Image (spheres, rainbow, N blue to C red):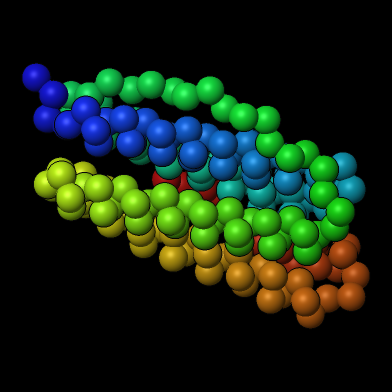
């Protein structure tokens, strides 16, 4: 017997898709940087992609622990070409803000349908999104201080994803 409502199960499956598409977005960005030998930025976005994949698996685990059914939605092709570093950094922040909105919607749904067992998971993601947005804003702010893309790349550091 499932301890997760059909409505929450469906909503969390949709979020799995959002997280996997996020990974695709960041892989495309990483490729853009790697093609231009901006290797630290490529690594930063590769690690971001791994983290997004780990987020999808966190939702998967929750659904299965609650007796639900996991469904992986079809993923859309993501943008692969960018004009410059700032465009990517601004798109990263906008995307993280979009995901924050999705997590907030899930939290509101969980409260509305009294799906209390999902609230701790969503609170974790709310805190995670604060960090994600902060990381994106910090990259933008730091980039504004550099005149040379390669010099900026040399100073980008991100820890390996450990979700």
Image x and y of residue 41, in percent: 74, 54
Residue sitting nearer the eye, 61 or 6? 6
Residue 46, above or below 73: below
| 131 shown above or below 103 | below
Residue 107 or 57: which is nearer the viewer? 107
Q: Image check: 114 left or right of 93?
A: left
Residue at 24% over, 33% down:
7
Number of numbered discs on residues: 0
Furthest residue to the bottom? 145
Pick the front one: 37 or 57? 57
Q: Position of residue 128 (x, y in %)?
A: 41, 58
- Farthest residue toward the left? 1
What percent of the width, then of the height, locates residue 48?
A: 58, 48
Residue 37 lies left or right of residue 24; in this view the side is right
Q: Residue at x 73, y 46 (%)?
A: 29
Identify which residue is drawn at 43% across, 56% down: 101
Quick one: quadrant of the C terminus?
Answer: top left
Q: In the visual, does 76 lie left or right of 57?
A: right
Q: Is residue 54 visible?
A: no
Residue 24 in sight:
yes
For the N terminus, the quadrant is top left
Residue 119: x and y in percent read 21, 51
Q: What is the quadrant of residue 77 in the picture?
A: top right
**Residue at 73%, 40% in the rendered image:** 79
């Amino acid at each position: 017997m499932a301890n997760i409502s059909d409505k929450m199960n469906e909503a969390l499956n949709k979020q799995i898709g959002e997280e996997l598409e996020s990974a695709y977005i960041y892989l495309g960005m990483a490729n853009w940087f790697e093609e231009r030998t901006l290797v630290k930025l490529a690594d930063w976005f590769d690690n971001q992609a791994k983290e997004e994949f780990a987020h999808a698996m966190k939702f998967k685990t929750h659904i299965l622990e609650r007796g639900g059914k996991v469904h992986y939605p079809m993923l859309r092709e993501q943008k692969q070409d960018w004009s410059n570093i700032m465009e990517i950094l601004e798109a990263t922040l906008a995307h993280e803000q979009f995901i924050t909105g999705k997590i907030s919607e899930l939290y509101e749904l969980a409260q509305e349908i009294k799906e209390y067992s999902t609230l701790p998971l969503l609170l974790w993601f709310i805190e995670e999104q604060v960090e994600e947005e902060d990381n994106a804003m910090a990259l933008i702010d730091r980039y504004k201080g550099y005149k040379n893309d390669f010099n900026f790349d040399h100073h980008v550091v991100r820890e390996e994803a450990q979700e």
